[in-house]
Amino acid sequence: MIFGYDHFHRPTAEIVDGGPRLLPDQPAVNNFEGWTALASWGEITTRTEIGLLVTGIGYRNPDLLADMARTVDHISGGRLILGLGSGWYEKDYHDYGYEYGSVASRMDLFEAGLARIEQRLDRLVPAPLRHIPILIGGAGERRTMPLVARHADIWHSFLDIESFRKKSQLLEQLADGVDRDHRKIDRAVQWTGADEAGEYVAEGVTLFTAVIRPDTNGYEFTEVESMLAWRRAQ
C-alpha cells in the first residue's frame, strides 16, 4: 500500500501519547493537493492499493468526497483505501478558509460525515468497483474508537504497545456491541522498529506504515528496507 498526505501545508510534528504534537519550527511548504495527486497514482500504478493517511473530513463536503473516492476507485481499477480522520492541523483550516472549531465540533462533523459518505457510496451509479475499505485514524476512547467499531475496515494508530493492547481490547468490546466481528477490522500502526514488531503482530496488527521522506538524493527508504528485512526473516 502507498499512502499520500492530505495536508495543504507540511506540519513538522512528533508523536506524543499516540498523537501529533507540533514542533516550534514549521516549514513554509505547500503540499500538492492530495486527491488530485492520488488520481494520478491510480494511473501510474497497477497493483498496489493507494490512499491518503488520512483525509481530514472538514476539508471537503462528505458527499463530494464519496464521489471523489468512487472516481479514484475506478481510475485505479478498484485499489483505493479511503483513509479518514477528524482533522487537527489548525493552519490548514485557517489558510484555506475552513472553520477550525473545537475538538468536539470536528468530531461531530466526522461522525456525521462518515454516515453521509457510506450512504452516498451506496447510491452512486456506476457503483465503486468494490467495497471501498474505510481506514480511520485515531484512538480516542470516547468518540473515535466507537466510530472505528461501527465504520472502519482498517484502524490506524501511533500507539505504543501497551496503549495499543488496551485500545485493541476496547475495540473488540465496542465491535461486539454493534454486532461486528472485530477480527474483520484490520489493525495498523506506525512502524517503530523490528524489536517491537513481533509484539504488535501478537496483538493483532496486520499492517505497518512507515514515512518516506525526501532528501537531497530523492527519497529516504531506510525505514522501509528495515521493515522488509524483518518480514523476510519471519
Image (tube, grey):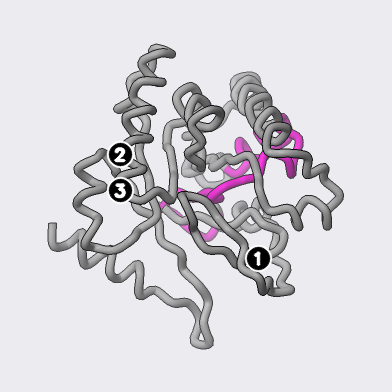
Q: Position of residue 219 (x, y in %)?
A: 48, 77
Q: Position of residue 2 (x, y in %)?
A: 46, 56
What segment carries the magenta color?
Answer: 43-72
Q: CA distance from mark 1 to mark 2?
A: 30 Å
Q: Is residue 15 above or below residue 168?
A: below
Lateral position of residue 98 relative to residue 164, left or right: right
Q: CA distance from mark 2 to mark 3?
A: 6 Å
Q: Position of residue 128 (x, y in %)?
A: 55, 31
Q: For the residue marked with disc 1, what is the amino acid?
A: Arg
Q: Quadrant of the C terminus?
A: bottom left
Nearer-the-camera pick, 205 or 233: 205
Circle nearer the N terminus (1, 2): 1
Identify residue for label 3. 161
Image point (33%, 20%), residue name: 181
Question: Which of the 4 image quadrants contains residue 70?
Answer: top right
Kindly tell me whether residue 52 is visible in this rendering.
yes
Asked which secondary structure carries label 2, the reply is helix
**Mark number displayed over residue 10:** 1
Q: For the residue marked with disc 2, what is the amino acid?
A: Arg
